[in-house]
Structure formats: C-alpha cells, structure tokens
Amino acid sequence: MTALHASPETAKSVTKDAPTGLPFGVSPWLEAACGDYAIKALSVLSLIGLWYIAAARLPATIMPPPHTVVEVLWQEMMSGPIWTHVLVTLRRIAIAFSLAMSVSLMLGFAMGMFRAAERFFEVWVLTAMIVPSLVLILTIYMVVGLNDMAATIGAALPVIPIVTINIWESIKSVDTKLIDMAKVYRAEKMRIIRSVITPQIAPTLFASARFGLGLVWKTVLFVELLGRSDGIGYQIQFYYQLFNMSGVLAHALLFLIIMLILEIGILGRFERRFFHWRPAARRL
Amino acid sequence: MTGNGQGTQLRSRAASIEISQVTKIFPDSRGGALKALDRASCSVSPGEFVCILGPSGCGKSTLLNILSGLDESYEGSAQIHGRPVREQLAAGFRVGYVFQEPRLMPWRTVRENIEFALRASDFPASQWRAKIDRCLALVELSDFGEFYPLQLSGGMQQRASIARAFAIEPDILLMDEPFSALDELTARRLRQQLLTIWMAYRSTVLFVTHNAFEATFLSDRILMMTKGPGRFCDEIDLKFLTRPRSYEDTQVFDASRNVVRRLFDHVGSLDAEDQTQLSSARSAPALQNSTRFVP
C-alpha cells in the first residue's frame, strides 16, 4: 500500500525538485558572453569619446587628445626610462600592499574574534581612518625620514583601517549555525576554522584585497609625489611642473593599463575560479 | 519492506537516552533569566522513534542541543546509553542532527558536505564513496552528489542533510522540526522517506515538532511538552499503529485527532494568550516565556 502510494508522488516531486540554477545551454551562454563583450567595448569607446570631446573644447596644452598622449607614451616606452619608474612603483605597491594586507588581516581577525581586541583597537582604527591620508603620510616622512621605507609605510597606513573594518565585519557576520552543525558532527576546532569559517569570509577577504590594491596604488603615487625622486608618481609631478600634460597623462595611462590587466586579468579570473559555487547576484 | 535490502549493510547500534531532572536557564540581557527547561525528565529506548510535541518556545530545541553536546551548561543529568552525554560522545558515540534548515556548506557539493561529516566522525576515506552513494540513494539524490546546495531546491537540500545525518551511522538521530520550512507536499514525501530509511536502519530517533499529525504519523511514542518553563506533561503510546504507515490510514488519522485533543487539554491549562499562540500555529520567538522570570 505504501509503495503504491509513494510512487506517483515520487515522480511528481522529482520533477518539481529539479534544480533551477544550473548553467544554461552553451549557445545562450555564448550569446550572453558576446553581449557582455559588446557592452564592455562600448564602455571603453565612450570613455575615449568623452576624452576627445574634452580635448576638442580645451587647449591641447591642458587636455591633449588621446592619440597625442598615446604617441608620447609610445616614445617614452621606446626610449626606456619609463620602465624603471614603472618597476620602482610596482615594487612599492607590492610591498605596501603586503604590509597593509597582513596588518589588516591580523587586526581584523583579532577584532572579529576577541571582544577585548575589538574594544582596544576600535578607537585606533577609527582614528587612523578619520585622520586625512595627507597628514598620515607627511607625519611618517617626518618621523621615519625621506626614504623608501617611509614611502611604503606611508602608502600602506591609510589603507589599513579601511581594509581592517571590512575583515572585522565579515568575521563578525560568520554563520554560527554552520559552526554548530560542524560541532555536532564532532569536527575539531582547526577543521572548523579551516573548512567552515574561512570559506565563509573568503569572498570578503578577496573583495578586501582587491579594494586594498586599488587604494594602495593611489597612495603609492601620492607618497612618490610628496617625497620621492623616482617612480610614476614622481614622473607625473615632474611633467606637471613642466606644464607638460601629455607627459602627465601618458604616465597615468600606462599605469592604468597595467593595473587594469592586474585587476581584470588576474584577480578577476582568480575570483571566478574560487567562488563558482556562488549564484551570481545579477540573476536577481 | 522497501529498505530491508540496504538494511543489512547498515550498522545498527541504537542507543538509549535518559534525561532526568534537566533544568536549563538562559540569562537575558537585562540581568533576568528565562527558564527554558524545568526539571524535565524522559527516556527513550534503543531503536525507538520518539516525537517531542509542544508549542513553540517550550524548550524542545534546547533539549536536543543538550543531547548533541552543543549545550553543556545545564542542571540535572542527560545520558546516552547509561553514561553522560559528554563522556559518551568522547567515547565515539555518534549523534546525527537534522536541523530546521539544511545547514549545508554552500561552497561544497552535496557529496563534499557529507564527506565533511564522515571525516569529522573518523570514518576512513576509503569508505566514504560507498557510504555516500548509499545514503544519497536512500534520499533519492543519487544524481545530485556533485551539485552545490544552492543549485538544489529546499526539499532536496533537506534530503541531503538527512543523508548526511544517516551517513555517519548515528547511534542517536536528533531532528529539530526538519520539515516545518517545507511545503506540505514535499514534507509528506520526506516523512515517508524518513520512515523507510529509519525502518531499514532502526537508530534511536528523537524528533521535535509542533505538528500533531506529523508526530502521530512518525513516532512510536509522543512526549508532550508544555511551555513556560518547558517540562514533559503527557505521553502517548502509538506502537499499536502498524508500520509501514500511510497517510490514508484512518487509524493514523483518528490517533492524531486524539493527540490534538490531549495536547489542547494541556495547553488549555495555560493562560488564554498562550493558547491562541498555539492554535494560530505560528512560531513564536523563544523569548515569549520571558514573562516568567526566575528570581
């Protein structure tokens, strides 16, 4: 009797339960991808278009058109010295970024997990966030001296509070229900941290890293402009003082391209690979 | 019947449960206290399917948390198979827990989620595949092991969590209103499936619900709880209902009417406010009881 009764319901429910969020067939996916690329191309083209419009309305000394800037950039790239400056700046970014991320991770984890640490560091973090970056950087230059160490610390410092707050919040919002589940099934503490807590905060950690990188490269240019005699920031400052806007924009453009490649090409790909289990928010 | 073929492969070490004079008090944020359990006592024999039936906020889940080792601060004694919960869990007794929500890790596939529980329960990796395949088959999810939970419907996710609970071959299976978040059709099918698996496996089950029909349909015995503070107030033996049970069986239906009547007899002894709370069958927040402070 039960078997007879169960079978029609079984059939019904299996179709009803069929998964809804699967990757769709290949051809609509391709279409979607092409659509994406078309939108991206349009977006870049309209940016260049805006630049042309601005260039047409302003004197060439103030706002040179894109092709002039590209030409200047090409000459710089061929003649060589720009590459040393790029490398110097990239090195500073790498060091400042690692510094900022490791301090933020330690602070964020401590503040998210221990109430005492939270109470203690909250004022520090808020203070560091509210004090203007300019003041922080100038103070570091004064205290540490006009050298490379001061530059990297100065570039990292304004980024730390912002990234710390991100990490701290993400740890506080960890789902304790999953932790309870893991405890019921007798998982050890280390395993819970590794398999239950870390994957939950990984998306935020990753977003924080991207965000941190975006901030660090701005602060690095800033510290170079304020107190270094090499690097892209210094070059931009140099050409600015010569009133050579083509030079300023050419350096900025090269860096923009490098950072875009880093952002989209490496970090973006990495993110897609790691978080494929998450349904895309845009499906909403 | 259906599951007996698989039953021979499943280990059966059903354990008994003895709860005696358990009192649990939650401090609230204003310095007061809420008594969730008040000298609650009950016992479950090995292999028995017992439902705890009671209104929301009567301490049913608290009891499960104590038995699963999640909650270790309480008065009284909670024992699994003659020894305190803590000792018994340390000695390797296994508790399966099906929560109200599936509680699957969304970044792991269904199979990996079950692997997590098997690894935590110290099963050798060589056995995982076979065990998982068998449990997924029991809940009819054989084709969905490599899917991520968010790709599945709510009912399928809950089935996966039932598969996880059975995969570790639990000595005790605790279920905390596992079907209350599902639509009635899905819930019915899952109840039937649960009984089929349980009949093959025969572990001790403690199933918490506020649904009188569900309790009647599933259990050998119903333990009724009243709220504020929670304690057991009645017991109904349902072993006379033959298994396998069916939804169409008038005997089950009559028995459930009797259960509802008995339940209302007890709830009626509470104030009118609580009664409306129950009859509207809404899940009231646990703090509902906070009017009854403990000095």
Image (spheres, coloured by chain):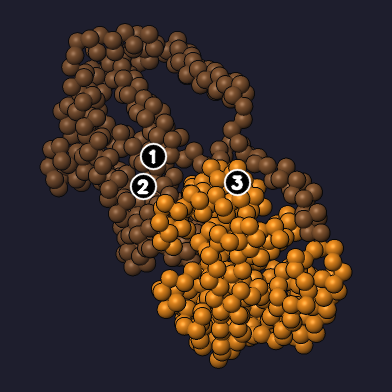
Chain colours: A brown, B orange
Q: Could you tell me which residue is drawn at 56 percent across and 83 percent down? A: B18
**Could you tell me residue B247's position as x and y percent?**
81, 63
Residue A39 seen: no
Q: Which residue is mark 1?
A: A211
Left or right, A135 with respect to B123, comes to left
The amino acid pointed to by label 3 is Ser
Left or right, A219 with respect to A3, comes to left
Residues tagged by mark 2 and mark 1 found on one chain of the structure? yes
Q: Which residue is mark 3?
A: B142
* Neighbour tally class for label 3: few under 14, some 14-19, many 20 plus, Cα within 10 Å: some
Mark on residue A85? none
For the residues labelled 3 and 2, the Cα–Cα distance comes to 43 Å
Q: Which residue is mark 2?
A: A163
Residue B239 seen: yes
**Could you tell me residue B169's position as x and y percent?**
52, 64
Residue A183 position (above or below residue B37): above
Q: Nearer the viewer, residue B137 or A239?
A: B137
Residue A208 position (above or below residue B227): above
